[in-house]
Image (cartoon, rainbow, N blue to C red):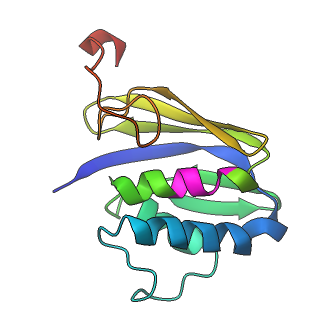
Amino acid sequence: MGYLVEPSGRLNLPQSDDAAAVAAVKAAMAERCVWFAPDESAVVDTLADIAEEAAALIIRDGDWIEFGYDDAGDPKWSDQATAFYVAIAPFVRSGIVHIEGEDGSRWSCTYADGQITQQGWNGWDGSIEPFGEPVEPPPPDQL
């Protein structure tokens, strides 16, 4: 059960900010407890460690983080996934993450100067901005 997603993209998030970003993510995800409880989970010291809880696989390459997904895993979207992408925004200099949902919906998160902007319709919650109100979906040929 859940809404499967396939993220992809690349963000410039300096390695020196990784620990601060993880702390921000843990706090944000704890407020929207679904299945990941930072105080009760295994050690999560890096963004790569915690990314699985946000339906992503991260590989760090210097000051860049590359997003993907694990076919063998269970990359499901939740409010905690949204919280992850919002919480890292202050630490990201630039980049974009594309997300494709199990129903073919596509949306992306663009980062610039510590801000996040969502493009497209989030197929999981029906929003057009992070934690926004649901809106009517676009016609199927525009997903």
Q: Nearer the viewer, residue 51 or 8?
A: 51
Does 69 appear in magenta?
no
Task: Give the percent coordinates (x, y) of residue 126.
Answer: 30, 32
Give the vertical position of 14 relative to 8 (above or below).
Answer: below
Determine whether, in the image, residue 104 is placed left or right of residue 99.
left
Q: Residue at x 71, y 63 (%)?
A: 60
Label total for image: 0
Q: Nearer the viewer, residue 130 or 72?
A: 130
**Does the image show residue 70?**
no
Q: Residue at x 36, y 46 (%)?
A: 5
Determine whether, in the image, residue 133 is placed left or right of residue 18.
left
Give the vertical position of 125 relative to 4 (above or below).
Answer: above
Region of the chain picked out in magenta, as a range: 84-89
Quadrant into which the N terminus falls? bottom left
Task: Give the percent coordinates (x, y) of residue 44.
Answer: 55, 81
Q: Quadrant of residue 81?
A: bottom left
Task: Give the percent coordinates (x, y) of residue 77.
Answer: 34, 52
Quadrant into which the C terminus falls? top left
Q: Is the stretch drawn in magenta largely helix, strand or loop?
A: helix
Q: Residue at x 69, y 56 (%)?
A: 65
